[in-house]
Amino acid sequence: MIIKKCKGCGALLQDEFSEKAGFIPKLTLESKYCKRCFRMMHYNELPKIVASNEDYEKVIDSVIAKNGLIVFVVDLFAFKATFNKKMIDKIRNKNVILVANKYDVLPKSTNISNVVEWLSRQCEKVFFKVDAIHIVSSKKGYYIDDLTRTIDMARKERDVYFVGCANVGKSSLINALLKKNTSIKDDVISTSNIPGTTLNEIRIPFFEDNKAFIDTPGLINNSDVLNQLLPNTYNKIIPNDEMKPITYQITNDNAIFLAGLASIEFKCKERISVIVYASKNLYIHRCKSSNVDNLYQTQLGKLLNPPMEEEIKNLKYTDMNINLDGRAKQNIWFSGFGFVSVIGECECKVKYLDKTEVYVTDAII
Ligand SMILES: Nc1nc2c(ncn2[C@@H]2O[C@H](COP(=O)(O)OP(=O)(O)OP(=O)(O)O)[C@@H](O)[C@H]2O)c(=O)[nH]1
Ligand SMILES: [Mg+2]
């Protein structure tokens, strides 16, 4: 009987059930990592066992009951979905540092102070008081030192809990903090682009007073486009590095497809500018609005890919009309795969996968 936790995912190690979390073959009992994490770390294998929202609820409720500093991590690229109301309601009355991760995917020209102001306005809108706002890239190590200083000041001899939706980069952020502040060179905690990688609380002692960084499983967001597609498609959707915005001059009855995941048909009196921010691997197609239906019928899974042909039968699309008055630059966000910046007055008919969240904000960039 083993009663150790896997250092990579937090699951209790066990040597009996090879298809269950925490499995470790008898011969490797000294290892600190379960087979699942070992294969993720050394063979880039995607995890087949993932956390559920029950795992998340169990851990988050115990976290809230404790007197710790909370680092609430959100994904700048999937902001609204990960600035999740359910999460915010859980942590409203705690000491919270808001960390917006994945800064490296925004164009290099992005003004960081403007993004901080934008984040602060988003907090005000939902009456969410935070002690500090930080923008970081866990992947590139950007601004990790600034965050370390804030955590040191705000911690007051308490543990530091990293919470947030699945896939925002909580585990990657702890790995980045460890690499910046210790002699550790490799990732300690397992990470992957499959939501639900961390299975249970992981305690990493870090401070001299024996207090720790504590990683937690993330809330799985059902409106995330990833939940509707197969893992092989993810790499086409999630930007791995800086997005290169593409600008279009749009006239009346033009349309833009974000691969086959969404389309926008524009009605405008004058020419408008539209900038698409998405992964370089996501195919963007411009056409006349009159061709949109035909393209959905004949090219979905082909030219308009993702989705792949084998994913199409499970997908449903829905429509939304958005009117923009042209007074300020606006962003139309497609939860998890990008946003479109619109400068000018127009009516937009948006078609998208029905479980994806689509919403409008003032411009982040
Ligand atoms: N571009 C970019 N990708 C990142 C960054 N941080 C994390 N990622 C990627 O985002 C994906 C999710 O990262 P994780 O650290 O596993 O996220 P998590 O929040 O711990 O996810 P769960 O354990 O599933 O709740 C991985 O593919 C990471 O490589 C970042 O700063 N920039
Ligand atoms: Mg994790």
Image: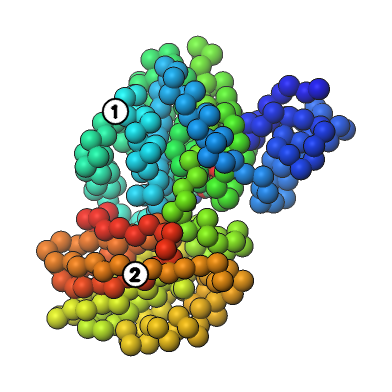
Q: Nearer the viewer, residue 318 or 183?
A: 318
Q: Which of the two discs, 2 and 1, labels the residue nearer the N terminus?
A: 1
Which residue appears at 43% of the width and 13% of the height? 157
Location of residue 93 in the rendering, given as x and y in whole percent from the top left corner: 31, 25
Please tell me whether mark 1 sits on a helix, a strand or a loop: loop
Disc 1 residue lies near ligand 1 with CB under 8 A? no
Density class for disc 1 (Cα within 10 Å; few <14, some 14-19, many ≥20) is: few
The quarter in which the C terminus is drawn is bottom left
- In the picture shown, does residue 80 fall above or below 132? below
Specify whether 161 is left or right of 323.
right
Q: Which residue is mark 1?
A: 131
The mark tally for this picture is 2
Specify whether 13 is left or right of 246.
right
The quarter in which the N terminus is drawn is top right
- Say if residue 119 shows up in the picture: yes
Specify whether 1 is left or right of 189.
right
- In the picture shown, does residue 187 fall above or below 263? above
Which residue appears at 82% of the width and 33% of the height? 16
Q: Which residue is mark 2?
A: 319
Disc on res. 359:
none
What type is the residue that disc 1 sits on? Asp
Distance, label 2 to label 1, CA atoms, is 39 Å
Location of residue 144 in the rendering, given as x and y in whole percent from the top left corner: 43, 36
Discs 2/1, front: 2
Specify whether 356 is left or right of 32.
left
What type is the residue that disc 2 sits on? Asp
Q: Nearer the viewer, residue 295 or 344?
A: 295
Location of residue 364 in the rendering, given as x and y in whole percent from the top left corner: 27, 54
